[in-house]
Structure formats: structure tokens, C-alpha cells
Amino acid sequence: MSQDVAVATAGDAYPDLHGASDRAGQGDVVARVTLQTVADKVGVSRMTVSNAFSRPDQLSAELRRKILAAADELGYVGPDPAARALARGSAGTIGVVFTESVGEAFRDPIAASFLGAVATELGGTGRGMTLLPSTGAGGTIPARDIAMDGALLYACTADSQALDWLQRRRLPLVFVDQAPVEGASSVLLDDRAGSAEAARHLLELGHRRVGLLVTAWGSLRPGDSARIAPDAATAGDGYVSRERVDGWMSELGPAGAEVLAAEMYDNTERYAEPAARLLLDRPDRPTAILCFSDLVAWTVLRVARELGLDVPGDVSVVGYDDSPIARSTAPELTTVRQDLDAKGRATATLLDHEIARSRGLPGAPDGPEHVTIPTRLVVRGSTAPPRG
Amino acid sequence: MSQDVAVATAGDAYPDLHGASDRAGQGDVVARVTLQTVADKVGVSRMTVSNAFSRPDQLSAELRRKILAAADELGYVGPDPAARALARGSAGTIGVVFTESVGEAFRDPIAASFLGAVATELGGTGRGMTLLPSTGAGGTIPARDIAMDGALLYACTADSQALDWLQRRRLPLVFVDQAPVEGASSVLLDDRAGSAEAARHLLELGHRRVGLLVTAWGSLRPGDSARIAPDAATAGDGYVSRERVDGWMSELGPAGAEVLAAEMYDNTERYAEPAARLLLDRPDRPTAILCFSDLVAWTVLRVARELGLDVPGDVSVVGYDDSPIARSTAPELTTVRQDLDAKGRATATLLDHEIARSRGLPGAPDGPEHVTIPTRLVVRGSTAPPRG
DNA sequence: GTCAAGTTCTGTACCGCTACAGTATGACCG
DNA sequence: CGGTCATACTGTAGCGGTACAGAACTTGAC
């Protein structure tokens, strides 16, 4: 690493209050303060101290004040979360699993925003959100080894090892943007409707030769170059891709449009660029392109400019998601909007329900729930009737 | 919420293997399978079963196979993470705290990418990353109530309540992009150097009237409108803002440049736009503007276009971070690059060290470490000599 | 004055696992 | 054949809490 490293003050982070350095080495641990320590000091039972922290209504205000004061004096912070998690059977966090490396998810603004929305919503119940790396080193498998109250699976492939463990643990699960699994709740975008609307929009403008640009995680590998799908109707791989292609084709097919689909590994610029070129740099170039995401559409815009093509004059482009970049391009993108906040809210709510259900709490729904988030086509400047 | 909700199959997610429904209600819990259950079935001690899972070298391969088979048959998934966390004194996750709501952090591509980098790196050690909502409902305070092995604080204000709890818990801490705290490790960007380089670049191009556009979380409140700082040299609030302003001024000041600074609440478009207007829409408009982030610079570009100003002809613009949007604008942004992967790597490493240190592990550094991530000016199309 | 119904505090029994210090057994050795 | 050493397994004692069922003492009603 090209970093300047400087080791500073070697002192302890906290003053050693009692100078209790029993051993010569560093990292001394001051004898742990527990409920019992506090109880002994005040002269009450351990249970009473526990109540002072966790159930204030179970003791007199006065005694509670005394206990809290003693605790403070001893440097007792509060019940140990790990011990409490064991005793109460609740960890206070929700796990999150992605197919791709967790790192990638943050690069996709849509995935990131969604996560943010979920985290915010989860915060309302005081729960944290634990991102589970798919690959744990040293034999540890986070999905198996980390304590949590439930988990949400986002755009995972069905064969995910993590999913397998979570299911075995019988954790309350919610699936987002992926094929729902029997017995678990799910939150899905109305991809088909959104795609259909987008395709209809192009047809209404008069387009009859349309290109599709989709991801195919399942069948392509990282490093694989883009390719034209043998049959547009079956192009794409992964739940969302398939749904979107189906939605597009539900309109394009019956209308007898000529459809050409390019597949790429994922929707990052790196893979999208050659795929875009595959569609744009050919004699029978489509007059319009439907993209898997705004990120892809943005790349198409760039490639088009490089090839000297005018958007929307020579080619119309439709994105997906209505992410911030949709309005940062010139022309601004026609795209399918999804409400990420609603999606996050729904996810958190269903997770809550699943947890309540798994604990047999009253008022919990007695079966899995399925929420569909509506989509809406937003028409901006990147689409127009085909030239001529 | 405008969502279609449909409750589907009300059956159980998992078949009730033993039909052990002791109560009439739903959510029955099949008697828990623990190490003891497995031990009884195989006829060995509980400890041996524990070893079969956690320390394979402690028993014969044969017995281990038998135990694992029995466990599988009983549906035992593996040691309960919560119990293990208590017994081992390690939770397997790292907490993450943001000043702003967790949700916001994901909207900032830089923050998101950084988090992603950390998560990836953490994954290498099999640890998860738990996002701690600052405000817990129902009296729970995540920073106090969630089990974790350490935490990283990212761009927090020093008075953060969460920080306070984490410190009291004496958790291993690493501070990122914020004022380092006595005794804890930190990862910082070399903001001063980057800013200075950017300012120098403008001076070399011949600019003598420069605008600054910075955030001021501390002194401004959400909703507050942007303002011109009384004194450019003291503009901005928050560690990073201050560092960047200092860096810029370290060059602009001595050069005798005329500096005008606008302050805004945060660097989202909403707050950046009026701030940009404050600088651009005035008679003595600066010939160049140094921005707190690429997001802000991007907004400046937009406002400039709206005002009919040419970039870089009428005004030069410099961003910060070299986020993806820096190359999506026209012209592409001159900006200060930071290596987010290196930052994430460094953070994970220091966290590791802090944890090792707090446990008195051999080989752990005996004091806090401080890493500075280098910055580098990347010159693109948004800067040029002033007109005339 | 008695009894039911609070309060307030305590005791016991776990929650499920791991660390560590044994014990037993057999191999190897001189 | 006794002694040393591995190897394989077990027992005990926690880790630091919480749930729940009392116990002791008030209080208030009739």
C-alpha cells in the first residue's frame, strides 16, 4: 500500500483507573464489571440490578437511582449485548445478503439507495443491519456464524450458499428482487408492468426495430465478453433480467417488432460498453434500445456519442430505475421509475412481520406476505420517433 | 403505501418434522436442538460434539463423521452464534457509525463506495459489518445494545451519542475522515495536500478570484439556506470541510487571491444548488470554483449552464473525490482523487490491529496507528485559464 | 381485623456454548 | 516392564444475562 503510516502515542486509550496491571504485557483487562459487581456494591440481588437497567418499572425509583449511580461509578456500561442476546434470544440485527460481493453492491447506486432505505427503516425499530460477506475466510461462514434476528436476501441467485445456511437456521427471511421462495415473504418490483410500459412507449413512437441490453449473471462469467442472444425472448439471466425481458417482449412480440438482445455479465460500465457497441455499431442498428438499468443507458449514450449517433434522433434510449444519473445525462433519460423508499419500507415491515410470526407473537400475520412495488414510466428527452 | 399486498400460502416455511404442536397457536417452536441433543444421540459428551464443529483436530475423524451425521439428522445447524459469541467473547461483526442518518450515507457515492470497500475487506476475515442506526426507537441504542467486536466511525461529529457509548464500552475503534480521538487509530485522507494541489493548479492557470463551496454541518441546520461566509479562511464546518478549506487557503492566501466562500448544509444537490447560485450569479463572480465534492461540482456545472456560463471558459470548476460522476459530466471534472479501496483496506487493517491489541494478542501493535491516504489532482476539462 | 391486591425485591433455573484441566488408553522406548 | 508422550475424550466451571415464580411487606376495602 502506498500509505504514510505513523504510529503515535503508545499510551492506553483509557486511563487505567485502578492501576491494576497484574501482568507485565500490554492489553491488560481490568477485571470485568458485571451485574453482580454492581449488585454486591449496592447490596441488592443481581436481578434487581438487571431490572434497574432493563425494566425500570420493577423497582422503586429511588433504588434504581442508587443502582445506576453505583454502576456509573464502577464503570458499568450496561448489560452485555452478547449475554443479553443469548438470554433473550434476540440479537438486535438483521442480516443482509447479496449475490455479488458486498463491495459491488455499493457501487450500484440503486442497490446502495435501497440498502439505505432499509437501514433507515430498520433504525426505527432500533435494529442494526449486518452485511454478510458471502465468502468468509478461515472457515467462518457469516450467514451461519453471525447472530441475527432475520435476514433479507437481495438479488441473490437461488444457489447461494448463504441462503442455504439462513434457511437451515430457520431465520425469518424476506426476499427482495429475486424469485420468492416457498414459505418466505418477498418484495418485488412490478418489473413486468414497467417494462411493458416502456416497450409500449417505443411502439407508440413508431419504433419497429428495438434492441435490448440485459445482464446475464447466471450464464456469463466475469470476464466474458458481451454477446448477442440467439433468441431475444429468452435473453438475460437472473430473476430481474428475465422479468424485464418478459415485460418488454410481452409488447414487442405481439407487435411484430424486430428485436435484438445483447447480453453482458453485469451492468457496470466495463461490461455495458462493449455490449452497447454490439447493438449500435452494426448496419441494421435498432432505432431504440431498452436497457436493464440507467447505468447501462448512460453507457449507451456515451457509446452513441462516440459513434457520432444522435440521441434521440438516430437512436432512442430507455433506462431503468430512475436513479439520479437519469437526470444528469444530456439528453435526460426516459426511464422506468421505482420507489426505493417504499421498497425499503416494505422490506423492513415484512421482516418485522416475519420475525413476529416466527416467535408466535400476537398480531403477526399467519403466513408469508408478498408486496409488489409499482413502477411508472418517466418520459424524458432520450426517446423520440425514429428518423424517417 | 401504494402497494399491492397479497397474503399467500399460509403454510409453514418448514415442514413440522415431529408434529410437535404443543400449543394451539401458530409459530410453534420445535424443541430446540442443541449440542446436548446431539451428544445424547451419539452417546458422547457435549464437549466432544462442540469440538466436532469447532475444533476438528481434537477428535478422531471417524467419530467426527458420526457426530456430524447425527447432527444433520437431528437438524442441528451448528453452534448457536449468540451462545458462541458469549462464550468466546467475540461477535463476528464490526459496527459502523455515521453522523448523518445511515440512509443518507448510501446516497453519497463516495461514502457508499468506501463502505463497500471496507465490507469487502472485512469479509476476508469472515466478519460482518453492522450499520448502527443513530436513533434507536423504544429506548434501544444500537451503539450500546448490539454485540460487536469493534467499530468504525465515519465522518461523525465529535458529540455523537453513539461514539460516546462505543467509548464507554471500550470497544476497539477506528476513526475515518474525522478528527482522531486520543488513543484510537485513524484513517485520514491527505485532504490538505489534495486541496493545496488543486488551489495551486488554479493559481498556475492564472486565476486570482476564486470561490469555495463547502459544507457546514455543524453550524447550519437542515433547511437552512446557503450563505456567504464572513471570512473565507474560516469557512466550513466539520473536520473534512475544515481540512479542505485550510488546504485551499494555504495556497490562495499567500498568493493574495481574492477568495469568496459559500457554505451549505450538506453536499446534496438540494443544498448545493442555491449555494452555487450565490457564487455564480453575482457581478464579481469568481473565475474558478473549488468544490467540496464532485457532487457539488456537478451541481455547479448545471447552474452554470442555466446561467449561460461556459465551463471552463467563463468559470473553472474543481471537484473532489474523483467519483464516477466526475467523468460523466461535460466537460469532465478536474478533481482530487482519493483511493477508496486503499482507504477501505487501511480501515479494515487498523480495526484488526485494534481488536488484536485490545485482546493483548501477540504481534499486535502496542499503540494506535494513523494512516494517511494520499490524494492526487486529476486535471480534466473543467479547468482552464481565466478569460481575458 | 381480615383478606385480596398491589409493590418491591429475591432465588433459581436456565440460554447454549467454550476453555481448560483433567482422565484413560495405547504407542514407543530403553 | 515401568516410564514418557501423544491422542482422544470428558467434567466442570464459567461467559453475563433474563424469565418466572415466589416472598415479604404495604395498602386499601369492607
Image (tube, coloured by chain):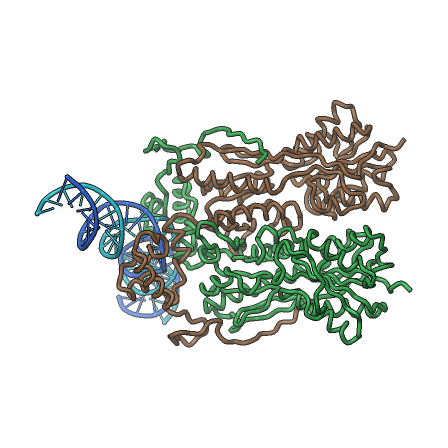
Chain colours: A green, B brown, C blue, D cyan
Q: Quadrant of the C terminus of chain A?
A: bottom right
Asked where in the image residue B301 lies, by quadrant, the reply is top right
Q: Is residue B108 above or below residue A317?
A: above
Residue A252 screen position, x and y as percent: 77, 72
The spot of residue B330 in percent (x, y) is 80, 45
Q: Residue A47: horizontal and vertical position, in percent?
A: 35, 53
Q: Quadrant of residue B79?
A: bottom left
Quarter of the image with the N terminus of chain A in it = top right
Direction from residue A86 to residue B103 in the image, left or right? right
Whether residue A309 sits left or right of residue B128 in the image: it is right
Image quadrant of residue A275?
bottom right
Left of B244 or right of it: where is A45?
left
Query: Left or right: where does residue A363 sit relative to residue A277?
Result: left
Looking at this view, is A106 or B180 the one in front? A106
Q: Specify whether residue B1 is in view.
A: no
Evaluate whether residue A222 shows in this view: yes
**In this picture, is B138 found above or below A1?**
below
Residue found 87% across the figure and 64% down from its top: A386
Give the residue displayed 30% in from the left and 62% down from the top. Answer: B39
Residue B44 in percent (x, y) is at: 27, 61
